[in-house]
Image (spheres, helix red, strand yellow):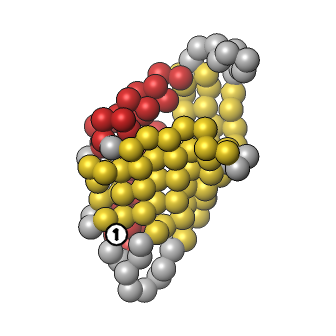
């Protein structure tokens, strides 16, 4: 896949994420999708497959009354085929409910991180979120 197409798919995924459009996110994924969230070097969430991803995405959407990922930069191969694309993001979210041993309803989470996308054909095969 060319860099421009990979960037288009990753951008569409993030736009669907921001809109809490889980079906829109799912439409961009390979059936065998793997998702990992890595925070401070530790895997905090992981799932494999569309249905497991849907369940995790629904939980994530319900956790925030507002959420937004801003794309800061997209890097990957500029020529030829690209297997992985890195997207630097700034995240801001407001919690919809109290989190055990964490923020209260209305609390803000702000961070910068990186999402790595790997592709199979024109679908996202792997998503690794780093913060």
Q: Is residue 60 above or below residue 71?
A: above
Front-most of 18 and 40? Answer: 40
Place of residue 100 in the rendered image (x, y in percent of width and height, measured from the top left): 67, 15
Side of 52 where 127 appears, left or right: right
Res 125 quadrant in image = bottom left
Q: Is residue 116 above or below residue 68?
A: below
What is the number of callouts on the image?
A: 1
Q: Is residue 4 above or below residue 22?
A: below
Place of residue 89 in the rendered image (x, y in percent of width and height, measured from the top left): 60, 53
The image quadrant where one finds the N terminus is: bottom left
Place of residue 65 in the rendered image (x, y in percent of width and height, measured from the top left): 53, 22
Q: Among all residues in the image, which is located at the extreme bottom?
A: 79
Front-most of 105 and 34? Answer: 34
Place of residue 42 in the rendered image (x, y in percent of width and height, measured from the top left): 67, 45
- Kindly state the secondary structure of the residue where label 1 is placed: helix
Determine if residue 53 is in view: yes
Front-most of 20 and 114? Answer: 114
Q: Residue at x 46, y 25 (%)?
A: 59
Q: Is residue 104 above or below residue 125?
A: above
Side of 37 where 7 appears, left or right: left
Residue at the disc numbered 1: 5
Q: Residue at x 61, y 38 (%)?
A: 44
């Amino acid at each position: 896949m060319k860099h421009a197409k990979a960037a288009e798919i990753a951008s569409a995924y993030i736009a669907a994420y921001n809109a809490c459009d889980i079906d829109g996110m799912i439409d961009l994924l390979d059936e065998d999708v793997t998702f990992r969230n890595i925070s401070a070097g530790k895997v905090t969430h992981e799932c494999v497959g569309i249905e497991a991803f849907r369940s995790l995405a629904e939980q994530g959407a319900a956790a925030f009354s507002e959420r937004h990922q801003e794309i800061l930069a997209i890097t990957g191969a500029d020529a030829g085929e690209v297997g992985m694309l890195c997207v630097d993001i700034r995240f801001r979210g407001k919690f919809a409910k109290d989190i055990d041993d964490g923020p209260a309803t209305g609390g803000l989470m702000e961070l910068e991180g990186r999402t790595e996308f790997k592709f199979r054909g024109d679908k996202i095969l792997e998503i690794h979120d780093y913060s």
